[in-house]
Image (tube, grey):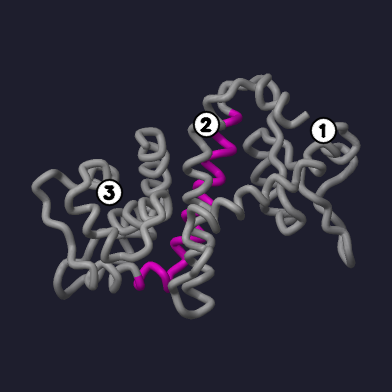
């Protein structure tokens, strides 16, 4: 959880401008969006089924207090107030930005200190000019499934002719493990929000939470071990 907290703080720091804009200029003070997002991460990590139980655990669980950023003597919010503040985030683009920043943290961290390029696999939905360009700017090779139906792909033979590209495509089924985690541990087995916009927010945010849990383990693995698992 220490490593996850460090990664989360880095992502939230990059989103400080968007988060500051969510504060109301007048009225009673609201809950800081950073606190809400960290608390919602805990809800996903520990399969807490309601905001009432989440706020209750933050009140007495020192690990939860530390992760959210509250001191031992700080007061905890009423669960209804927490839910209303959460709804403000649900109607914003914070989840998409949070997910994008987590993925960009993952790619940049894995490439740091390496002489050779690493690769990143992705579905054909990521065969876009901006994604491929951004990944290459980070000195990472995009192993994206080509999307060339009725259009030209953003990948060329420089990438697709390499043996590693075929290996990456053959390992795409591993994404199903992530969906299994989202249903078994995460909140997607029985969604408790109404409306497509809120469900979409919860899905994207839960995917970011899953990546945050995986990141410390991925960054701790040696390059040889990673190649062995992908062979």
Residue placed under numbered mark 1 in the picture: 164
The answer to whether the residue labelled 2 contacts the one labelled 1, judged by CB atoms less than 8 Å apart, is no
Name the element at disc 3.
Answer: helix
Does residue 16 lie above or below 84 as drawn? above
Residue placed under numbered mark 2 in the picture: 217
Q: Quadrant of residue 62?
A: top left
Q: Which of these two is toward me, 133 or 77?
A: 77
Q: Which portion, as a residue range, is magenta?
A: 87-111
Q: Position of residue 105 (x, y in %)?
A: 51, 40
**Mark 1 surroundings: few (<14), some (14-19) or many (≥20) residues within 10 A:** some
Q: Which of these two is toward me, 159 or 121?
A: 121
As for residue 163 lying within the magenta part, the answer is no
On the rendered structure, is 161 left or right of 229? right
Name the element at disc 2.
Answer: helix
On the rendered structure, is 85 left or right of 109? left
What residue lies at 44% left-to-right and 72% top-to-bottom? Answer: 192
Residue 128, numbered circle:
none
The answer to whether the residue labelled 1 contacts the one labelled 3, judged by CB atoms less than 8 Å apart, is no
Judged by its main secondary structure, the magenta piece is: helix
What residue lies at 52% left-to-right and 63% top-to-bottom? Answer: 188
On the rendered structure, is 1 left or right of 117? left
Q: Earlier in the sequence, mark 1 or mark 3?
A: 3
Q: Earlier in the sequence, mark 2 or mark 3?
A: 3
Residue placed under numbered mark 3 in the picture: 68
Does residue 136 lie above or below 208 as drawn? above
As for residue 102 lying within the magenta part, the answer is yes
**Mark 2 surroundings: few (<14), some (14-19) or many (≥20) residues within 10 A:** few
Measured Cα–Cα span from mark 2 to mark 3: 22 Å
Measured Cα–Cα span from mark 2 to mark 1: 22 Å
Q: Earlier in the sequence, mark 2 or mark 1?
A: 1
- Total marks placed: 3
Name the element at disc 1.
Answer: helix
């Amino acid at each position: 959880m220490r490593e996850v907290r460090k990664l989360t703080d880095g992502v939230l720091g990059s989103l400080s401008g968007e988060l500051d804009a969510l504060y109301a200029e007048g009225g009673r003070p609201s809950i800081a969006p950073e606190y809400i997002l960290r608390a919602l991460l805990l809800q996903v990590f520990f399969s807490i089924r309601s905001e009432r139980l989440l706020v209750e655990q933050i009140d007495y669980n020192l690990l939860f207090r530390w992760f959210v950023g509250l001191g031992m003597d700080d007061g905890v919010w009423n669960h209804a107030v927490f839910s209303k503040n959460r709804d403000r985030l649900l109607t914003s683009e914070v989840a998409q930005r949070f997910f994008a920043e987590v993925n960009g943290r993952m790619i940049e961290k894995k490439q740091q200190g390496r002489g050779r390029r690493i690769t990143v696999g992705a579905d054909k939905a990521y065969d876009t000019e901006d994604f491929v360009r951004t990944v290459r700017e980070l000195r990472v090779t995009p192993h994206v499934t080509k999307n060339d139906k009725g259009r030209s792909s953003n990948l060329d033979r420089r990438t697709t002719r390499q043996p590693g590209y075929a290996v990456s495509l053959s390992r795409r089924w591993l994404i199903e493990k992530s969906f299994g985690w989202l249903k078994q541990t995460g909140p997607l087995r029985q969604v408790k929000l109404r409306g497509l916009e809120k469900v979409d927010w919860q899905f994207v945010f839960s995917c970011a939470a899953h990546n945050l849990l995986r990141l410390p383990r991925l960054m701790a693995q040696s390059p040889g071990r990673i190649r062995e698992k992908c062979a």
